[in-house]
Image: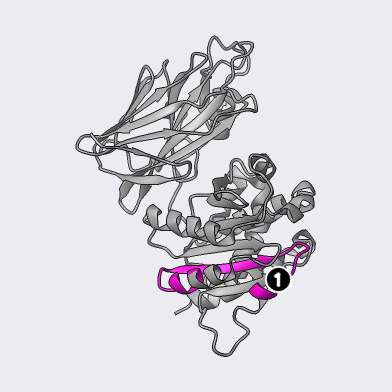
C-alpha cells in the first residue's frame, strides 16, 4: 500500500468510511484520547472526551494507542474530532521530547503518516491531528501542536470541566460536566464564538465585523492566511510584541470571514517557509513561541507566497483566499513576486501587502501605481512603523477596503 507523508498543517480528503489513527510514542508511556467538538470548538457534553475510562462514543473509539472514527456514524452536531497523546504531568521528567508518530489508514486508500517536529519546551500533551468536516465530506489535518498543561489542561480549553479535588492517577482528566453546546447556525458574525473561545479578541472582532459591514461584504466568506516577514531587521518588532499584536488583529478579522477560528501562518525567512497556525484557543504569545524556532534571514517572499497558495489549493476550499502578507523591506526576488501575482489572479486569491518595519517598501507601494497595472487582486496598506498605534476602526478599514472592492460583484 502506498504511503504518503503529511507536513505540519497539511490536510487530505478522507472517504466517509472508518478511519484508524494509530499513535507510536518514543519515550515515556502515553495515553491516546479524542475530543468530539461542535461548530463552536467545544465539546457538547462530558461524553465527548473519549479516553481509556470512556473508550467509545458517537462513532469514535479508543483501543490502546489507536483511535477509530466511523465517519458515517459521527453525528451531524460534531464538526471536528481532535486526536491527542498525553503523558502524566505529575510524573517527574515525563515530557515529550521526540514527537509521537501518527499513521492514518482507510480501506482502499493510501496510508498517511505524520511526525511533528521534536519538542523542547516541556510539553506533556500534543494534538497530533484533527478530523474535520468540509463541503459535505471529511478531511484530516496534521497538527503537531504541543502544550505543557497535560490532557486536563487541554480538555479544559475545549470546554470540559475537570474535577480539581481528585488526584490524577494517570494523565487522563476526570470530566465533571461540559459547558459547551453544539451551537446553532452561524450568523453574519458569530461574536459569541469569539467571546467564548478568545474573549480578549471580542472587541477587535467587532471592529473588524463593522469594517466588513461598512464595505458591504459582511455576509461573504474567505480563507484568511498570514505571511510574516522574519528578516533580521524585524527582530525588535517581534521582541516588542508588535508582530504578535498584528497577528491577533488578523485572527480577529478571520473570525468574521472563516468560521474555523484558525489562520495558517507562514514565516518568510532565509530557509524553507515555516508553516504553522494561530487559533482562537492558542493565540496568546503564539507568535513569540513560533518565531524562535526559525533563524533570522533575508526573507524569501516568493517562496512563502507559493507555500500559501499551495496550502490553499490543497485544502479544497470553495471560498476565495485573502492572504495578508506583512512586509518590512523590499523583496530581493521582485520578478518572481510579480509573476506569482499575475499567475494567481485567476485562482481566487487576493493579496494584501501590509507594510510596517524599518525598510523601504517602494516596490509594494507602486505595484498598482501605473495606469497599465494588471494586478487586480493586489493591494498595499501602510500600517506605519507601529501598527498597534493605529486605531482599530481605521486599521480594519485599511485591511479590508481593497479586498471588499475585489469581492463585490
Q: How is the image coloured?
A: one colour
Instruction: Work out whether 199 lies above or below 59.
Output: below
Residue 15, percent from left and from top = 25, 43
Residue 261, percent from left and from top = 53, 49
Q: Viewed as shown, does residue 141 lie left or right of 272?
A: left
Task: Residue at 53% x, 16% y: name it.
Answer: 171
Q: Quadrant of the C terminus?
A: bottom left
Task: Residue at 69% x, 54% y: name it.
Answer: 231
Give 398 or 29, whichever is nearer the viewer. Answer: 29
From which residue to which does the magenta span run?
Answer: 340-364
Give 302 or 318, whichever is nearer the viewer. Answer: 302
Element type where label 1 sits in the image: loop
Magenta stretch encompasses residue 342: yes
Residue 24, percent from left and from top = 41, 22
Residue ranking furthest to the left: 108
Q: Viewed as shown, does residue 357 lie left or right of 93?
A: right
Instruction: Work out whether 173 lies above or below 71.
Output: above
Q: Is residue 192 visible?
A: no
Give 196 or 375, whichever is nearer the viewer. Answer: 375
Magenta stretch encompasses residue 347: yes
Instruction: Work out whether 325 lies above or below 145.
Output: below
Q: Quadrant of the N terminus?
A: top left
Residue 335, percent from left and from top = 55, 72
According to the picture, the residue beneath numbered tag 1 turns out to be 361
Amino acid at each position: 500500500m502506498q504511503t504518503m507523508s503529511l507536513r505540519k498543517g497539511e490536510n487530505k480528503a478522507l472517504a466517509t468510511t472508518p478511519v484508524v489513527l494509530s499513535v507510536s510514542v518514543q519515550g515515556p508511556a502515553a495515553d491516546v484520547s479524542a475530543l468530539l467538538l461542535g461548530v463552536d470548538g467545544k465539546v457538547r457534553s462530558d461524553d465527548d472526551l473519549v479516553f481509556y475510562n470512556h473508550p467509545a462514543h458517537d462513532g469514535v473509539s479508543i483501543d490502546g494507542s489507536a483511535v477509530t472514527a466511523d465517519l458515517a456514524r459521527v453525528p451531524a452536531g460534531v464538526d471536528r474530532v481532535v486526536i491527542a497523546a498525553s503523558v502524566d504531568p505529575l510524573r517527574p521528567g515525563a515530557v515529550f521530547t521526540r514527537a509521537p508518530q501518527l499513521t492514518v489508514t482507510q480501506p482502499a486508500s493510501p496510508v498517511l503518516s505524520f511526525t511533528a517536529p521534536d519538542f523542547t519546551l516541556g510539553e506533556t500533551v500534543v494534538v497530533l491531528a484533527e478530523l474535520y468536516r468540509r463541503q459535505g465530506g471529511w478531511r484530516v489535518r496534521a497538527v503537531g501542536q504541543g502544550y505543557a498543561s497535560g490532557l486536563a489542561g487541554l480538555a479544559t480549553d475545549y470546554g470540559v470541566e475537570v474535577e480539581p479535588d481528585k488526584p490524577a492517577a494517570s494523565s487522563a482528566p476526570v470530566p465533571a460536566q461540559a459547558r459547551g453546546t453544539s451551537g446553532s447556525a452561524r450568523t453574519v458574525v458569530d461574536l459569541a464564538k469569539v467571546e467564548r473561545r478568545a474573549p480578549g479578541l471580542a472587541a477587535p472582532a467587532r471592529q473588524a465585523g463593522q469594517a466588513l459591514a461598512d464595505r458591504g461584504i459582511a455576509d461573504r466568506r474567505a480563507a484568511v492566511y498570514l505571511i510574516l516577514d522574519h528578516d533580521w531587521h524585524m527582530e525588535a518588532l517581534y521582541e516588542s510584541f508588535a508582530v504578535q499584536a498584528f497577528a491577533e488583529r488578523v485572527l480577529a478579522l478571520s473570525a468574521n470571514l472563516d468560521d474555523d477560528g484558525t489562520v495558517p501562518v507562514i514565516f518568510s525567512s532565509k530557509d524553507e517557509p515555516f508553516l504553522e497556525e494561530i487559533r482562537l484557543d492558542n493565540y496568546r504569545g503564539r507568535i513569540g513561541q513560533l518565531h524562535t524556532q526559525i533563524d533570522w534571514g533575508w526573507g524569501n517572499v516568493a517562496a512563502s507566497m507559493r507555500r500559501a497558495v499551495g496550502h490553499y489549493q490543497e485544502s479544497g476550499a470553495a471560498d476565495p483566499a485573502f492572504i495578508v502578507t506583512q512586509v518590512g523591506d523590499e523583496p530581493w526576488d521582485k520578478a518572481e513576486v510579480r509573476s506569482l501575482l499575475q499567475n494567481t489572479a485567476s485562482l481566487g486569491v487576493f493579496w494584501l501587502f501590509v507594510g510596517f518595519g524599518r525598510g523601504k517598501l517602494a516596490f509594494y507601494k507602486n505595484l498598482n501605481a501605473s495606469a497599465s497595472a494588471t494586478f487586480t487582486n493586489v493591494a498595499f496598506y501602510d500600517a506605519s512603523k507601529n501598527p498597534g498605534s493605529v486605531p482599530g476602526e481605521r486599521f480594519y478599514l485599511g485591511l479590508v477596503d481593497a479586498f471588499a472592492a475585489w469581492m463585490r460583484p
